[in-house]
């Protein structure tokens, strides 16, 4: 006797433990499809097409290792699936299996730490500058602001133009992500900092701006404008040029001297005709 039933038959059994994400659902939908029959021996072989079945689409150990390695390299799931299909032509794995394996790998990598604790540990490990604000009554993270040390240097040099925007709960932490982008003097953009906020209220943005001001150096002030002439000085550069001139060969010194004379007294040293007509009327004749 042979009995074939749907993979989504029966009903979902509610686990005793609390589900972490409320959006978690079961594949079981109570499908009533069922076929009963007898096995008859025939010479015709069945078509080996099992695409879409969970057991046929499960990942092998080598496939799991590939998923782990590519996940560490920040490869997108769709590209991971394409790589698996190229490695093993007969693979029936779908994108859902890749997402599940990525989740298991990240969870094992995180260990006993929560997602926010793991984020803070990674910021410490990689030397990021970060600030955290906690809720006093519940000892939980309310806002977190972080930036890279290179971004701090760029921000202290190019702080004239800042672009700010936030996304609405499109990340793993279900929190608005606030991003600040700066513009350099060559019109290139760079990331100043990022922040996870509990809400988009004035208090949250005010705290982010206060943390942003902490990134400025001790000699910088956002409230007072300084002219470029006050900050520009060639004394140090000129001393460096003189030190290098003392070490160059004598022939090069002569060439540099001729170039400086041409630059400072162009009308008297250049061999080309003068830029303006020379007055000749009334001049003494030789």
Image (spheres, rainbow, N blue to C red):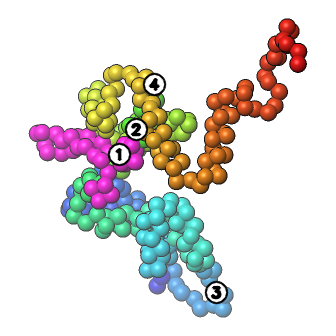
Residue 111 disc label: none
Highlighted magenta segment, given as a residue range: 124-153
Rounded to the nearest whole Å, what is the CA distance between mark 1 and mark 2?
10 Å
Return the x and y of residue 84 as percentages of the image width and height.
54, 72
Rounded to the nearest whole Å, what is the CA distance between mark 3 and mark 2?
69 Å
Return the x and y of residue 149 as percentages of the image width and height.
36, 48
Return the x and y of residue 208 as percentages of the image width and height.
30, 34
Q: Quadrant of residue 108?
A: bottom left
Residue 229 disc label: 4
Give the residue at mark 2. 155
Q: Quadrant of residue 50?
A: bottom right
Could you tell which of marks 4 and 1 lies nearer the N-terminus? 1
Q: Is residue 236 left or right of residue 106?
A: right
Could you tell which of marks 1 and 2 lies nearer the N-terminus? 1
Give the residue at mark 1. 147
Name the element at disc 2: helix
Are circles 4 and 2 on residues that touch, CB within 8 Å? no
Residue 121 in the magenta stretch? The answer is: no
Rounded to the nearest whole Å, what is the CA distance between mark 4 and mark 2?
20 Å
45 is higher (above) or lower (below) than 30: below
Q: Is residue 284 visible?
A: yes
Give the residue at mark 3. 45
Name the element at disc 1: strand
């Amino acid at each position: 006797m042979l009995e074939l039933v749907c993979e989504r038959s029966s009903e979902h059994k509610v686990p005793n433990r609390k589900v972490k994400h409320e959006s978690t659902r079961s594949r079981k939908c109570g499908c009533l499809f069922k076929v009963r029959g007898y096995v008859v021996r025939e010479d015709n072989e069945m078509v080996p097409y099992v695409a879409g079945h969970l057991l046929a689409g499960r990942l092998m150990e080598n496939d799991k290792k590939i998923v782990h390695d590519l996940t560490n390299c920040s490869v997108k799931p769709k590209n991971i699936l394409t790589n698996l299909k190229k490695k093993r032509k007969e693979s029936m794995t779908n994108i859902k299996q890749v997402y599940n394996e990525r989740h298991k790998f990240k969870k094992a990598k995180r260990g006993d730490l929560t997602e926010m604790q793991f984020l803070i540990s990674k910021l410490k490990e990689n030397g990021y500058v970060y600030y955290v604000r906690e809720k006093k009554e519940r000892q939980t993270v309310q806002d977190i602001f972080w930036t890279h040390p290179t971004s701090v240097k760029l921000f202290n040099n190019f702080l004239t133009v800042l672009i700010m925007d936030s996304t609405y709960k499109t990340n793993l932490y279900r929190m608005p992500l606030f991003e600040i982008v700066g513009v350099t003097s060559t019109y290139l953009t760079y990331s100043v900092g990022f922040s996870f906020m509990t809400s988009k209220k004035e208090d949250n943005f005010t705290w982010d701006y206060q943390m942003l001001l902490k990134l400025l150096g001790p000699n910088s002030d956002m409230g007072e404008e300084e002219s470029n002439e006050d900050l520009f000085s060639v004394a140090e550069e000129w001393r460096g040029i003189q030190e290098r001139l003392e070490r160059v060969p004598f022939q090069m010194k002569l060439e540099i001297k001729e170039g400086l004379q041409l630059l400072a007294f162009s009308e008297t040293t250049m061999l080309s005709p003068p830029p303006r007509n020379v007055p000749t009327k009334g001049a003494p004749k030789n």
